[in-house]
Amino acid sequence: MRLAARRDRAGGSRDRRPPPHDPEQLYLEYVAALAASGDRTAIRSKLADNLDNACPERPDFPDRERPMREKYRPARAILEAALRQAEAARAEWCNASEAVKWR
């Protein structure tokens, strides 16, 4: 999955938000593809979105508690696992870079 790189109207900064969800694609398939990208920024962004959407303090939450729990809990698990894996890979890469640097 590629991240959409869009320019904002204010001055051309790059927006690294994940691409919007295609309505034809199942939500968990979308989340799995995003997680598989290994893009830590995109994974963090989607995880924050997931946590916000599943927040029980939201005013619209009482009527949607079960659907939201069924939709967002599995996605959260996928995203958290992917973020742990991406962070571990980044740490390993940084450690390897330091080892090479000091040889």
Image: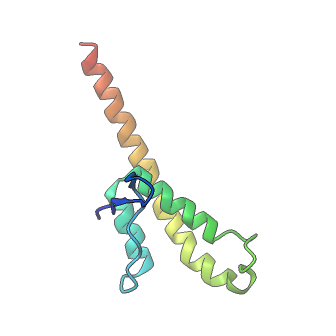
> Outermost residue toward the top?
103
Residue 82 against residue 31 in the figure, above or below: above
Query: What percent of the width, then of the height, locates residue 24?
Result: 36, 86
Q: Quadrant of the N terminus?
A: bottom left
Residue 49 visible in image = yes
Q: Quadrant of the C terminus?
A: top left
Residue 87, by quadrant, is: top left
Residue 89, by quadrant, is: top left
Query: What percent of the width, then of the height, locates residue 56?
Result: 73, 71
Which residue is at 69% across, 81% downward?
Answer: 65
The colour scheme applied to this rendered structure is rainbow
Residue 82 visible in image = no
Query: What percent of the width, then of the height, locates residue 32?
Result: 38, 68
Residue 58 against residue 92 in the figure, above or below: below
Looking at the image, which is closer to me, 70 or 51?
Answer: 51
Which residue is at 63% across, 66% downward?
Answer: 52
Which residue is at 39% across, 48% downward?
Answer: 86
Residue 40 against residue 3 in the figure, above or below: above
Query: What percent of the width, then of the height, locates residue 66?
Result: 66, 83
Which residue is at 33% across, 63% downward?
Answer: 4
Residue 18 against residue 23 in the figure, above or below: above
The tally of labels here is 0
The answer to whether 37 appears left or right of 43 in the picture is left
The answer to whether 73 appears left or right of 90 in the picture is right
Looking at the image, which is closer to me, 68 or 60?
Answer: 60
